[in-house]
Amino acid sequence: MALPDDAEALTDLHTDVWEEAYGALVDPEVLADRRRRRADRVRRWRESLTAGPATTYVVPSPAGERLLGFVSVGPARNDPEKILPETEVWALYVRAECYGTGLGHALLRRAVGVAPAVLWVLDGNERAMRFYRRQGFVFDGATVREPVGLERRMVRRGPAVVVRDRRPEDLPVLVELLGRQQPTSRYPFRWPLPFPAEEFLARESEERAWVVTVDDVVAGQVTVTTVGDDDFGRLWRAGTGRANAGLGCVSAFFVDLDRRGLGLGGRLLDTAVAWVREQGRVPVLDVVQQHGDALAIYRHRGWREVGSARPPWLPDDEPPVLAMVLDDPSGQGRLATTHSP
């Protein structure tokens, strides 16, 4: 927990992260004025850390020479009718170098866990909006005009839906969940698997893995894996013009079918796609054509087919597996579709 002696470091961090997050959204003079008023802001931070109603948690760098992120939480403000959750996230920021590392999620979880909460986000701050949606927050329609721009209110009520990094202790739960949903979803297509299910869920080529929880109960997973030199890798490279290092494969993606309607799959997929794009790479995946619901969702979300291939495990009487890519929203880098024999 932050102490009054952290006031200067917090002021500098707060100034830096505002410029990183709001540089394209806020009048540059507003940001410059914050730097000019550093002494006053240090004083205000010290007062808040001494006797303010909010509690602030910070994360220092490994060497301890500066702060990497902070979160401040306190009682919900501007709620005379007491219709909002009691806790408000007053501020949550991490340095740009920490985007995609899970630091923001760790700070939020440290401050409020998975409990209901309310917060305000600057209109146009799409990164923050995506992050809070993954943590179960939704817009409730309330807005307020501040000097920096339009603020929009987000609220998280029960059940609490959270996307977080997968932990080793999640694997037994995921193995059970995978087997329970397979007869209905037919995912994985091969079943039973010819190897331990843990190896399907946590692959050697895995780069990142997330789970979605509902009221702190694991309810699904998605991973991002590297791309190899097989038929699918060839199709993805041809369809995007990228080398393997410029691609990220969405893999081992499934949710608890008993939790349908909560948007769990969308939150997991958005998390994986956002992480791949933050690395400057293109998201790719493969999908069995019999998984019609999944294929329809991918197409609806803008995924594009770039060909098809027959992996060794696919029965001869089944149609080939589709290779898909998700183009940059600008449409740049879109190449012609190819098809394997």
Image: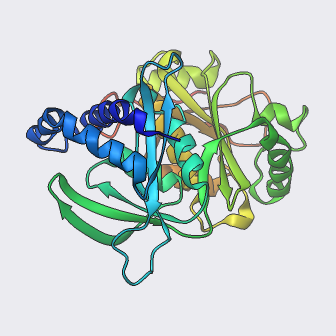
From the viewer's side, name the closer residue of 137 and 322. Answer: 137
How far across and down, in percent of the image, does residue 125 sit? 30, 48
Q: Is residue 129 left or right of residue 174?
A: left
- Tell me if residue 100 comes above or below residue 211 in the rendering: above
Its colouring scheme is rainbow
Residue found 28% across the figure and 46% down from its top: 44
From the viewer's side, name the closer residue of 302 and 199. Answer: 199
Task: Point out the residue furthest to the left here.
Answer: 29
Res 97 seen here: yes
Query: Which image quarter: residue 261?
Result: bottom right
Residue found 70% across the figure and 51% down from its top: 220
- Tell me if residue 297 comes above or below residue 38 in the rendering: below
Residue found 44% across the figure and 49% down from its top: 72
Q: Is residue 173 left or right of residue 244?
A: right
Res 326 seen here: no
From the viewer's side, name the closer residue of 338 and 253. Answer: 253
How far across and down, in percent of the image, does residue 206 sit? 67, 26
Q: Work out which quarter of the rendered image holds the C terminus and state it.
A: top right
Residue found 40% across the figure and 63% down from its top: 154
How far across and down, in percent of the image, does residue 203 sit? 74, 27
Q: Is residue 185 left or right of residue 231?
A: right
